[in-house]
Image (cartoon, grey):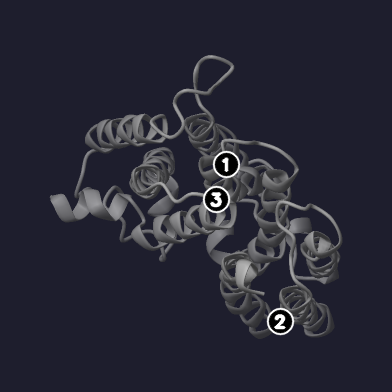
Amino acid sequence: MIVYFGQLLKFKLSITVVFSAVCGYLIGFDSFNLQHFLYLVIGGFLVTGSANTFNQVIERGKDKLMKRTSVRPLPQKKLSYVNALIFGIIIGVIGLLMLNNINPEDTFYGLMSKAAFFGLLSIFLYVFSYTPLKRVSTISIFVGAIPGAIPFLLGYVAATNNFGLAAGFLFVIQFLWQLPHFISIAWVLDDEYKKAGFKMLFGGKKNKFPAIISILTSVLLTLVSIIPFFYIKELNLSLFAALIVFFLGFWFTLKSILLLKYKDDLSARKLMLFSFAYLPLVQITFVIDKLLRPYL
């Protein structure tokens, strides 16, 4: 049974979310605080796992209609939805309490630490906005990109205890990245999503419309991502790092252009695969640039 509870966490997805938060922390910290860092890693993992669990409880009937998700514990009746719900609540509370121990002396509106606030916000938006909207409209992609972009911001806020321009910039980077990322996934899994009644592909068809949105957001992402070279002194991106980030964005845009040209599953899959690589490569570039800055 423990294995099935573990599957509710969506381990790979949760690890990628924590990775974004860790990168945000490493970009922002001046004095490394091991205790706060561990609270961020463990608390962030539990909060993400909680949101994933709630999502599976809500979508347990839809999941059994798709081959990819039909093997999950709830569609297979390996766990009851009540036990899954209790598990999600417990790990969510523990995760939020851990995040609340990061800079607890400076609370957000006197209620909780900034890290805990953004953790709670991500759960709320993912579970109560994105999840139900998937059955209603493709606007869910924009809504889902908000909690999806919070981890990068949360990590930075955990390090600096400051929600300002730099934190907002990191949020925008991850928000914009998710649109081509979501489009490519929705294109590849379009038939599966339609079986379950999910409206995930812009326009509802594999045509130029979603491909154009992917191009526009990829171009915008490429331009926005190099802003710290010119502005935002807290990030202060070097020329070399800016060139790397720009090149990655250019390649990302090229993949979107190829999707428009061919409008086929192969091009969408190539875009999807590169999207998985793009974000961590950009984040690692920012982190390394920050860590090497004192020696340059």
Report, in whole angstroms, how far the alpha carbon at label 1 lies from the one at label 2: 44 Å
Distance CA(mark 3)–CA(mark 2): 47 Å
Instruction: State the residue in front, 47 or 159.
Output: 159
Q: Is residue 237 visible?
A: yes
Q: Amino acid at mark 3?
A: Asp
Horizontal side of 80 relative to 41 (left or right) equals left
Q: Would you call the spot at circle 1 few (<14 residues within 10 Å), some (14-19), or many (20 or more)?
A: some
| Residue 289 at least partly seen | no
- Precedes in sequence: disc 3 or disc 2: 3
Residue 247 left/right relative to 80: right
Q: Earlier in the sequence, mark 1 or mark 3?
A: 3
Q: Nearer the viewer, mark 1 or mark 2?
A: 1
Quadrant in which the C terminus is drawn: bottom right
Q: Residue at x 26, y 52 (%)?
A: 73
State the image coordinates of residue 191 (x, y, percent, origin top left): 58, 66
Q: Report the amino acid beneath label 2.
A: Asp
Q: Residue at x 41, y 52 (%)?
A: 63
Badge 2 crowding class, 10 Å Cα cut-off, few under 14, some 14 to 19, many 20 or more, is: some
Q: Amino acid at mark 1?
A: Thr
> For numbered disc 2, what is the local secondary structure?
loop
User: Tag 3, which secondary structure?
Assistant: loop
Residue occupied by mark 2: 264
Q: Which residue is mark 3?
A: 30
> Would you place residue 290 above or below residue 151 in this image?
below
Residue 52: numbered disc: none
Q: Earlier in the sequence, mark 1 or mark 2?
A: 1
Q: Are marks 3 and 2 in contact (CB under 8 Å)?
A: no
